[in-house]
Image: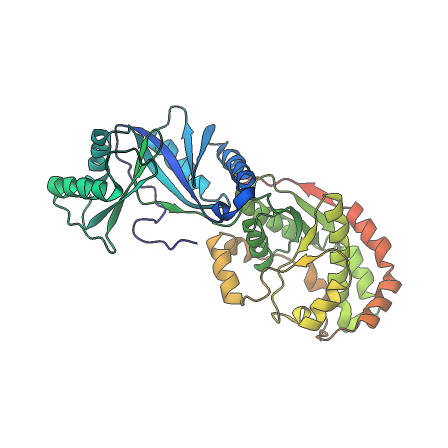
Amino acid sequence: MPTLDAETVPVREQVPAVDGEPCVLIKLGEVVLKGKNREQFERRLADNVRLAVRPIARVDVIRRHGVFIVRTKDATAELVDRIAMRITDVMGIVWAHRAWRVGKDLASVERAALELMAGRTGSFAVRSRRRDKRFPMTSTELDRHIGGMINDAYGQPVRLKRPDHTLSIEVDRDEVFVFSGGLPGQGGLPVGMSGRGLVLMSGGIDSPVAAYRMMRRGLRVDFLHFSGMPFTGPESIYKAYALVRELDKFQGGSRLLVVPFGKAQQQIKTSGADKLAVIAQRRLMLRTGELVARRLKGATLITGDALGQVSSQTLTNITAQDDAVRMPILRPLIGMDKIEIMDQARRIKTLTISELPDEDCCSMLAPLGAETRAKLEDLHQIDKRLDVEELAEQLADSVQEHRPVYGDAG
């Protein structure tokens, strides 16, 4: 992901008035490497952009080689600023530039450059890119001409390495785009290009980050939360709802499915599982998740497991959990430590929600000593006593669906 600097911090700065049309210029990342499949990836990304900004404005997304141009009717600088900020949450985008679309003539470029650099202090550099080679000036000639003009007008020194400000000029087929700075995007692949999966969503820090990382790889995800109801209050559901609502900004159309799990936990507790209770519970959750995922046309389960983080996440216990289902389980956090996970949770704005207090269903089954090397034969015996296949079916049938929407107060 791009590194923020003085020119890329996503602040709502005062945008000067320029004789041209404000628009958003989107730079793609990994999508441009897709070869014969690139057209399909770009169409999906364009659809995702339109869906994300629909509450703000109806937009046209114009695809050019390596860039998208986002335009809207009766655009103002302030409206385009809001659109650009929203676009940065769309997976598959590396940069969103708030640009001015001006005429394909030198005079229009000069006016826009002078307006954009007016009132700035410190050094600057001009970076031009000529996608249309018919333009009479080369990129280097345009850099020198516009840079000299700004220096003459404002006295700002030119510094080609690490300038305080960078003025970008991109000559396209029918117009020229002039902009300074940009907003970093999420990178990755467009959501929906890698299929569909189901996230086992606790109220903790890890599973929201796991969901984010899989959305960034193009997976559309639904969310399954196990509540301790009827033996706990609804707090964990509220928390899961808030987390999914925040994550919805990255994909839209998110679904949260809630399973009242308290009575099943009570059965596990009275089954003689003892130190294996947590692993038995995790296996039952995965079995239920597999049934729900198949009903939703999902092809994988996603968890927030990180190797060795807690007793249930030793290699032996993770292997014992995989044995419970036939569906593949993705664990995108498996090699991360807690500090790394918290840093990413903070960046995607789920950390403060995850840290809110609630009565997690897992606390109901916490034994005095947890088993770190679960044996499959012992777990299979517990499964038989519980009749886990029937129990998982009952749990899958009990799901309650919610539709958290990003930006909705709930």
Instruction: Say if residue 401 shows up in the picture.
Output: yes
Which corner quadrant of the image does residue 190 belong to?
Answer: top right
Q: Nearer the viewer, residue 160 or 216?
A: 160
Can I make out residue 223 in this image? Answer: no
> In this rendering, would 87 be left or right of 176?
right
In this rendering, position of residue 123 left or right of residue 383: left
Q: Position of residue 261 (x, y in %)?
A: 75, 54
- Residue drawn where x is 84% and y is 67% of the image: 380
Q: Quadrant of the N terminus?
A: bottom left
The structure residue drawn at horizontal position 75% and vertical position 47%, both measured from the top left corner, is: 294
187 or 396: nearer the eye? Answer: 187
Which image quadrant for residue 110? top left
Question: What colour scheme governs how the chains and residues are painted in the rendered image of this protein?
Answer: rainbow
Q: Going 21% across and 35% down the picture, which residue do you hit? A: 115
**Quadrant into which the C terminus falls:** top right
- Tell me residue 165's x, y (percent): 25, 48
Q: Nearer the viewer, residue 125 or 97?
A: 125
Q: Position of residue 145 (x, y in %)?
A: 18, 40
In terms of image quadrants, where is residue 114? Answer: top left
Extreme residue in the top direction? 74
- Decide: is 144 above or below 74: below
Residue 72 placed where, x, y %?
A: 42, 27
The image shows residue 140, relative to residue 70, as above or below, that is below
Residue displayed at 69% across by 42% down:
401
